[in-house]
Amino acid sequence: MNDSARRLLETPGPSLLLPDAVLLPKGPADGYAVVVADGSFRAVGPAEELRRTHPHLDGVRLPGHLLMPGFVDAHHHLTQSFGSALAFGEPSEIYRRVWVPLEGALDAESAYTAAKLAALEALRGGFTTVADAGTRAAVDVDVVASAARDAGIRCVLGLICNDTDGTGSVVGGDAGDVREADAGVLSRADTHLARYAGDPLVHPSLAVSVPEAASSATLRQVARLAAKAGATLQIHVNEHLAGVERSLLRHGLRPLEHLHRIGALGPHFLAAHATLLTPRELTLLADTGSAVSYNPVASAWKGNAVAPALTMAERGIRFGLGTDGTRGDGFRLAEAAEFAQRIAYGLASGDSSCGAGWTWLEHATRGGADAVGLGGLTGAVAEGMAADFLLVDVTNPELALSWDMPWELVRRGNRDQITAVFVGGRLRLWQGLPTTWDGPALVRRAAELARATVARAPITRAHRTSMTAREGSTVR
């Protein structure tokens, strides 16, 4: 498509869009079209039918393109983008050595810039929604909200509700955890939930970093607040062996079991990672209607295990796909989701399909929206849903010879095939660049601020740089 098509797509008012095909919940539909008005899909159906029912609209032809839902990142850390390249080769629980010190070194400008940089990367990768698990930076969380709005991405914005440092007593079970809920934490949570009510792009959420970072009483009350407000409660849970062992020593229960006992689980609950699950814990997730963010790239880069996502799908457990801030590429995330299941589970059982492609595409879009609490708003091309969508070029060598489009999008899709990204019916990105603000200028400023931030942060890395490691290897 050329610049004249871009101008038509940027025109305000109702639009009749005529791509070659539309990816519907039931699968790709050739010869379909959509009507977009006031930020949502007003009609979806066969192109000729929509032409008849909307004769006042001049159709915008989009030859060689698939119109599909935008990806949903079910787990992100927007203010950690300055350290994304510090995670390579690191063992688990690097949040203690890298992320907490890094975010602690951010001021308002650097936090805003880091969050907007992450949002830009996400948009370039086809994400129209990101769920941010909360920042530890000592700034007003509205800095992150402003960055998301200014970038033009939909954001489920977590507010961290920790009331301990996560290093409480690990001896004697729950006997020492008798404190009342932290009134200050609950007040801030209430304010956060009210602050963004009705915001078109920012959707409030509550978060606790890890279960041991909040007392049982605070966890229980924060969960109740989230459930009452129809918001999500995001917690990193059963991610690493060390966290599971700390919970066993402190509570006599695994993390997810502990959260269930205190009443924190439910449809409002979003478990980040959940890689180390027993059959009983899978049953708890299914029975309570809790959701999971399956983060396959994080497992590969710095995890202890791969979440049993195929089993979750079979058990009807709600889940989305999350990047954990590793890399903002929706197609590569979907491919990693399928690949990790095949390596971890499929090879041993002779399962060559591992979800048959459509599973990962669905959980990267509609399933992800449901997991982060926005299932009634986004994630699908359907009448009444927010017009959060992508225009994907299907004339390239990877996708032109199509036999099974869902599989091909998962295995052969790339972000360079995304021509346009729309959020709330507005064109936000065109051929990899923002349409209303200067992306390259932001990247340059981020590079300056990142160097200064990392230099002053007390970061401890376990792994040497790649070339330093090469010097110590047997390869010369």
Image (cartoon, grey):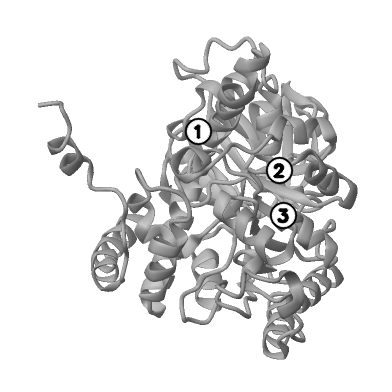
For label 1, the residue is 332
x 85%, y 58%: residue: 266
x 59%, y 46%: residue: 322
At label 2, counting other C-alpha atoms closer than 10 Å, the crowd grade (few under 14, some 14-19, many 20 or more) is many
The nearer-to-camera label among 3 and 1 is 3
In the rendered image of this protein, does residue 137 appear above or below residue 48?
Answer: below
Answer whether labels 1 and 2 touch (C-beta < 8 Å). Answer: no
x 41%, y 79%: residue: 108
Residue in front for this viewpoint, 178 or 206 = 178
Q: Is residue 172 visible?
A: yes
Q: Position of residue 392 (x, y in %)?
A: 54, 31
Residue type, numbered disc 1: Arg
In the rendered image of this protein, does residue 257 appear above or below residue 348?
Answer: below
For label 3, the residue is 254
The Cα atoms of the two marked residues, 1 and 2, are separated by 25 Å
Please tell me which of labels 3 and 2 falls first in the chain. 3
The Cα atoms of the two marked residues, 3 and 1, are separated by 32 Å
The Cα atoms of the two marked residues, 3 and 2, are separated by 9 Å
At label 3, counting other C-alpha atoms closer than 10 Å, the crowd grade (few under 14, some 14-19, many 20 or more) is many
Which residue of the protein is positioned furthest toward the front in this rendering? 172
Q: Which element type, helix, strand or loop, lies under badge 2? A: loop
Q: Position of residue 437 (x, y in %)?
A: 41, 61
> Residue 406: which quarter of the image?
top right
